[in-house]
Image (spheres, coloured by chain):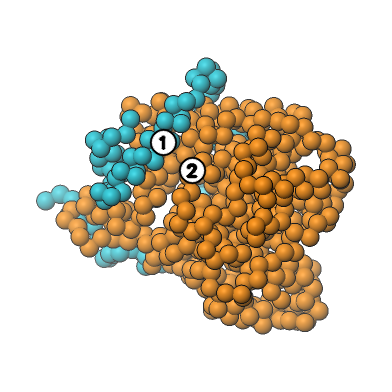
């Protein structure tokens, strides 16, 4: 059951805040999906293994050799704040 | 050249009726004049350099056997093209410049195609009407007050408007097939694993599959053959031989067993749409197919399972947008936690936030078994039912959508995706092709095939298009 308290907990986990106007619609839409899922007849799926992937394939191995990577300078051109090749964030420990 | 198919443009290029440079310049000019909000950015410099190289190759006699040499192509804005903006129609990536090419882009460019522009979409590919784009909705080519469909609405609109013969999109729950239907063109979602997802910004990784928009099955087959290659950079790319898509296009349909999902056709209430479908089924019947009524699992339950699972994968995939390495960073930050929370809250749109929250909830302690695992078991039941059905039929026919393109601003419910999501849940290939107009808006019919039988659904579509001319109907875009 999604209520205001649950939604607030999930917002914390997801590092996201909804505005007051967005909250009611979010609760309604999320609850709508969960209500539909509750209608699944448990007997119909009992004993079935969860399907995590649509194709039953094994992931192939490759030789343990490093591929050339994209150079750091080019990658960091998209970063909001960089200094001496490092991503800058607010101080974590005083 | 507007509305030309890939095959027709190839002839014009080979006969020197037009050069690749002229074609690229014309296409860029047409895009800039277009009023549908279908394009988010153009790749002028790259496109003109590629076109110049294509002209030189052709002049040196290297080009005639390469189907894609000089052909302009547009990509949904979640495909990375090195040096171009890739925004996913989100404020989060508004200023992001790609640092590498998606595998599909690389293959297309190696074969001489011209990367012209990036198409509008629902933010991070979440939506069915393109109204979740941070940069405004795409207008339907047949009526500007209606949506183009989603999430690959821009890619569908540019092909329908005749700007390019081919465009790429991505299909997580119907995002290629449904906009193809709403815009009156052909849209293919291949089998999961058939095309590489490398370089396409992820939404739901066990569902996402790149797809192709074109006017015809023939153009789709040519393009699919060009990009259906194993990619070691995508761990779910499948090392499976590709079909001979082109040579099988014209196989007779006589004796094919086709499953009809009657319960979905019966949900359609609009008489004009019902008539379009009946006429289309008559065309197939005249070619000798045998229809067998079949049932798929309860569509509403499939919708619920799909939204729980795809949202769970989305919550995981979109956690990478944290305001640290790329993307929007809030200016209103006190500590690391507020950097994450404010950056994400300011930049993600409302629907994206809802899906991240639904997925986070379904994956959280205490709810994981009740929702996530239950939905995965439902997914197994859906795959099992498809496998049983394919013991007795070759292909499955069903509507692509229960309606034509809704008006912009009209409420579009998650249940409206019920016709398309089952193919994604089971990883099956599916295609939508136009069966004509109902009250001036296009109607699409969907065909689902067995895993890796893209050749079969392309064959069905091609035979239909040989017997009809719906794929030659074009919107009179310049009327407004």
Q: Name the residue: 25% across, 60% down.
A: B330
- The answer to which quarter of the image holds residue B117 is bottom right
- The answer to which quarter of the image holds residue B367 is top left
Q: Secondary structure at mark 2?
A: helix
Q: Relative to B417, is B69 on the left or the right?
A: right
CB within 8 Å, label 2 to label 1:
yes
Quarter holding the C terminus of chain B is bottom right
Q: Which label is found at residue B414?
A: 2
Q: Nearer the viewer, residue B452 or B143?
A: B143
Q: Relative to A8, is A39 on the left or the right?
A: right
- The answer to which quarter of the image holds residue B113 is bottom right
Chain B, hue in figure: orange
- Specify the chain shown as cyan: A
Residue B334 placement (x, y as % from top left):
16, 56
Decide: few, some or many residues near mark 2? Use Cα within 10 Å; few <14, some 14-19, many ≥20: some
Q: Which residue is mark 1?
A: A32
Residue B355 placement (x, y as % from top left):
40, 44
């Amino acid at each position: 059951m999604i209520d205001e308290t649950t939604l607030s907990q999930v917002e914390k986990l997801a590092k996201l805040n909804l505005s007051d106007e967005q909250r009611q619609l979010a609760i309604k839409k999320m609850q709508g999906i969960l209500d539909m899922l509750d209608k699944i007849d448990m007997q119909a799926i009992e004993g079935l293994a969860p399907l995590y992937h649509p194709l039953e394939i094994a992931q192939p191995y490759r030789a343990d050799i490093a591929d050339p990577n994209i150079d750091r300078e080019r990658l960091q051109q998209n970063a909001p704040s960089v200094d001496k090749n490092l991503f800058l964030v607010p101080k974590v420990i005083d | 050249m507007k509305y030309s198919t890939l095959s027709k443009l190839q002839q014009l290029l080979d006969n020197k009726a037009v050069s690749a440079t002229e074609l690229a310049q014309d296409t860029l000019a047409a895009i800039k004049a277009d009023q549908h909000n279908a394009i988010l950015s153009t790749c002028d410099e790259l496109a003109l350099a590629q076109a110049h190289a294509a002209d030189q190759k052709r002049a040196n006699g290297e080009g005639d056997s390469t189907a894609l040499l000089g052909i302009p192509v547009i990509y949904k804005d979640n495909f990375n093209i090195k040096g171009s903006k890739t925004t996913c129609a989100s404020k989060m990536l508004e200023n992001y410049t790609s640092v590498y090419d998606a595998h599909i882009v690389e293959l297309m460019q190696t074969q001489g195609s011209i990367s012209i522009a990036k198409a509008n979409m629902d933010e991070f590919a979440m939506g069915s009407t393109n109204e979740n784009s941070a940069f405004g909705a795409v207008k339907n080519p047949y009526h500007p007050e209606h949506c183009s469909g989603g999430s690959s609405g821009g890619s569908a609109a540019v092909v329908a408007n005749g700007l390019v013969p081919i465009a790429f999109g991505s299909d997580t729950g119907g995002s290629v097939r449904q906009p193809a239907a709403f815009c009156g063109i052909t849209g293919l979602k291949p089998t999961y694993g058939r095309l590489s997802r490398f370089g396409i910004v992820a939404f739901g990784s066990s569902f996402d599959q790149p797809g192709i928009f074109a006017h015809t099955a023939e153009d789709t087959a040519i393009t699919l053959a060009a990009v259906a290659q194993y990619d070691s950079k995508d761990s779910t790319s499948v090392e499976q031989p590709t079909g001979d898509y082109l040579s099988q296009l014209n196989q007779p349909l006589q004796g094919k067993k086709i499953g009809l999902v009657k319960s979905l056709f019966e949900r359609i209430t609009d008489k004009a749409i019902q008539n379009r479908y009946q006429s289309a089924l008559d065309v197939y019947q005249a070619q000798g197919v045998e229809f067998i009524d079949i049932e798929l699992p309860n569509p509403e339950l499939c919708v619920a399972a799909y939204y729980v699972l795809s949202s769970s994968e989305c919550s995981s995939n979109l956690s990478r947008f944290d305001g640290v390495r790329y993307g929007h960073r809030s200016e209103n930050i006190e500590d690391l936690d507020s950097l994450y929370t404010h950056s994400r809250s300011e930049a993600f749109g409302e629907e994206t936030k809802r899906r991240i929250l639904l997925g986070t909830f379904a994956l959280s302690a205490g709810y994981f078994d009740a929702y996530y695992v239950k939905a995965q078991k439902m997914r197994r039941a859906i795959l099992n039912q498809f496998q049983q059905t394919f013991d007795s039929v070759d292909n499955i026919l069903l509507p692509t959508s229960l309606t034509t393109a809704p008006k912009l601003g009209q409420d579009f419910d998650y249940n409206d995706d019920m016709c398309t999501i089952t193919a994604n849940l089971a990883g099956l290939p599916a295609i939508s092709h136009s069966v004509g107009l109902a009250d001036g808006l296009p109607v699409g019919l969907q065909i689902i095939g067995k895993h890796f039988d893209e050749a079969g659904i392309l064959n069905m579509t091609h035979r239909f298009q040989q017997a009809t001319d719906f794929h030659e109907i074009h919107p009179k875009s310049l009327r407004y």
